[in-house]
Image: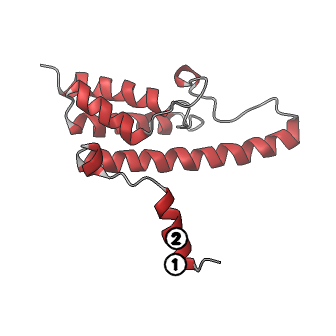
């Protein structure tokens, strides 16, 4: 049986260790990707719990987390958020400030429409759209 410290070390060994240096990301993009991953994880738990409660009440006729239907994919992409940000950064030559402004756009959207949740089905499309809009605002000459 593993002790608490061995268990935490054991679980870390099974997870791939990727940091900003391995992904060639500026630190600000690494922080944004970490924040978005936590947001998506929190929203997934929230949607699952609330949908279970709604299923009990009305036989599933109303589902939560579907407010951003335009951005929803059929399934979540196979690429992680940090890898996706790395690809956008590498191939678009956008400045890191575009990514920060893009995150602010996503945040503004979720505040304007509180029933809109950032989920694994829409986070990649929201990212690329918001970064593109931010680059038009900041980097175009």
Residue 82, which numbered label? Answer: none
Residue 5, which numbered label? Answer: 1
Q: Is residue 45 above or below residue 66?
A: below
Q: Is residue 34 above or below residue 134?
A: below
Q: Is residue 63 above or below residue 44?
A: above
| 66 relative position to 9: left or right | right
Spatial separation of the CA atoms under disc 1 and disc 2: 5 Å
Q: Position of residue 69 (x, y in %)?
A: 59, 23
Q: Is residue 88 above or below residue 53?
A: above
Q: Work out which quarter of the rendered image holds the C terminus and state it.
A: top left
Q: Position of residue 5 (x, y in %)?
A: 51, 78
Specify few, some or many for label 1: CA neighbours under 10 Å numbering under 14, 14-19, or 20 or more.
few
Residue behind mark 2: 8
| Colouring method of the image | secondary structure
Specify few, some or many for label 2: CA neighbours under 10 Å numbering under 14, 14-19, or 20 or more.
few
In this view, the residue in front, 8 or 74, is 8
View extreme (bottom): residue: 3
Give yes or no for contact between labels 1 and 2 (Cβ–Cβ under 8 Å): yes
Dot 2 lies on which element?
helix
View extreme (left): residue: 141
- Which residue is pictured at 80% across the width and 41% down the height? 54
- Which residue is pictured at 80% across the width and 46% down the height? 53
Dot 1 lies on which element?
helix
In this view, the residue in front, 87 or 134, is 87
Q: Work out which quarter of the rendered image holds the N terminus and state it.
A: bottom right
- Which residue is pictured at 39% across the width and 55% down the height? 17
| Residue 115 placement: quadrant | top right
């Amino acid at each position: 049986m593993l002790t608490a410290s061995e268990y935490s070390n054991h679980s870390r060994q099974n997870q791939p260790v990727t940091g900003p240096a391995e992904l060639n990301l500026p630190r600000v993009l690494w922080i944004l990707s970490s924040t978005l991953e936590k947001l998506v994880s929190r929203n997934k738990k929230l949607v699952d719990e609330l949908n279970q409660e709604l299923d009990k009440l009305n036989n599933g006729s109303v589902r939560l987390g579907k407010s951003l239907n335009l951005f929803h994919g059929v399934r979540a992409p196979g690429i992680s958020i940090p890898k996706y940000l790395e690809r956008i950064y590498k191939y678009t030559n956008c400045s890191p400030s575009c990514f920060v402004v893009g995150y602010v756009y996503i945040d503004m959207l979720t505040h304007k429409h509180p029933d809109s949740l950032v989920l694994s089905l829409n986070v990649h499309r929201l990212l690329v759209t918001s970064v593109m809009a931010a680059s038009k605002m900041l980097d175009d000459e």
